[in-house]
Image (cartoon, rainbow, N blue to C red):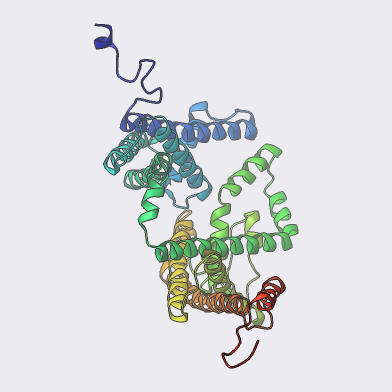
Amino acid sequence: MTDLINRPGRDASGPTGPVRPLSTVAALAGVAAGLITLVVCMSLALTGWFLADAGAHGQTTDALRVGADAWLIGHGSHLVASGLPIGIVPLAITMGLLLTAFRCGRWAARNSILVADDRVLGSGIAAFTGSYVVLAVLVFVLASTAGTSPSLGRTVLGAILVAALGGGTGMAIGTGRAGRLLDEVPDWVREVAVGAIGGALSLLAAGAILVALSLAVHLNEAATILSQLGLSSGDALTYTFVIALAAPNLALFGSAYLLGPGFAVGTGTTVSPTAVSLGVVPAFPVLAALPHEGPTPGWLVILFAVPAIAAGIGVVVSRRDGEVLTYDVAAMRGAGSGFAAGVLISIAISLAGGPMGTGRMADIGAQGGQILVFATGIMGVGGLLAGLGQAWWLRRGAFDDEDQTDPDSETMPIARKASTDADSETAPITLPPDVDA
């Protein structure tokens, strides 16, 4: 009778691991991922409010609502505040949302029943995404006011993407299904994917270095603009933190500059290696990093080689342990990696811009079509050349190895040559039949 009422998996001889289904844990993890980032955004907004004027103006609920709006903007929700559209997404917030969703998804996978079926994993991702979207809609309803209205459609779409990509990837890795799926992918697909990601990240790093160097050169101008704003120490600290949230956007603008078409900081403006047309720009210290208006030096055309080099770095990284390929196959894989890297960086650059008001400030960012054409073309060529160069290098090393293992080669290792000589000395001598021993 005792054995009949014992619950499965709870006796001493049964399994002692988690017994909760993945969908249940994933639903809780989805809510946790949203609440963690929401509380962080609200806490930062509340801290900035107290640093600004020690809470002398406004109410605590106003600061909390600003944090909720920032959380929604991180999901790509365009905000209309007092009739002014705010469409630039601080990508640092988006990256934090994705990272948190990934960690919560992995936690859910490790604290649930072992997943042995892709359908179970799919149901877990659906539960994670569903609970996350419900929370996002609830925050949208509570944060919307008469003077501030986020975008519901963009909020839902952004929440789906963050939960599915971040949480889904975390659960796939946590359950071990990701490794099994990757094993089924052909080697050339993995190689092209790694090369594309490496090339896009290399160009992003180059854009960040360009922005940092330009800001360092114009540091005095940036400090002058900041002092003219008349901010208190708390305001300046909050202002600097807000600019830091847009650091990935600035790095992507630098990547757009290196690709050639450049970007705009207002309607009718252009910032590129071949032309700079600005006019009057807002008094933001970070905009001091922009080049001066007018004709640009001719030597800046060498910057067009940076995206090709970035694509080449991605190809070299993806093929560092690769097999020896023929030149045509290596060229096709390299060109494919470069082309895919151009597509990835173009998508990221298109997400970095948006309106910051009406009129002149309604156009900030890069033209997606032009960036896509230049990125895929330049990085595709760079990947092709890197693939050919890598193939030549690997084939050269393979031929050198064959020469070293040739018994007739003069460069044969001494140990092997000595053993060959010793064998020849001790080998028996066979005489012809007509010769007397």
State whether residue 39 is above or below residue 415: above
Q: Is residue 343 above or below residue 179?
A: below
**Viewport quadrant of the C terminus:** bottom right
In the displayed image of the protein, which residue is found farthest to the front? Answer: 436
Q: Name the one closer to the observer, 382 or 222.
A: 382
Residue 91 in picture, x, y percent from top left: 50, 50
How many numbered markers are drawn? Answer: 0
> Among all residues in the image, which is located at the extreme top?
1
Instruction: Give the residue at x 29% y 43%.
Output: 118
- Residue 83 visible within the image: no
Front-lying residue, 320 or 400: 400
Pick the quarter of the image with the N terminus: top left
Q: Nearer the viewer, residue 225 or 271?
A: 271
> Horizontal and vertical percent for residue 41?
51, 36
Kindly give the residue lying farthest to the bottom in the view shown. Answer: 434
Q: Tell me, yes or no, if residue 157 can be seen here.
A: yes
Above or below, 58 relative to 210:
above
Residue at point 49%, 59% (across, down)? 361
Name the outermost residue toward the right.
220
Relative image position of residue 67 (x, y in whole percent): 49, 36
Q: Is residue 341 left or right of residue 202?
A: left
Residue at image location 66% in from the left, 70% down from the top: 292
Q: Residue at x 47, y 75 (%)?
A: 325
Residue 355 placement (x, y as % from top left): 45, 56
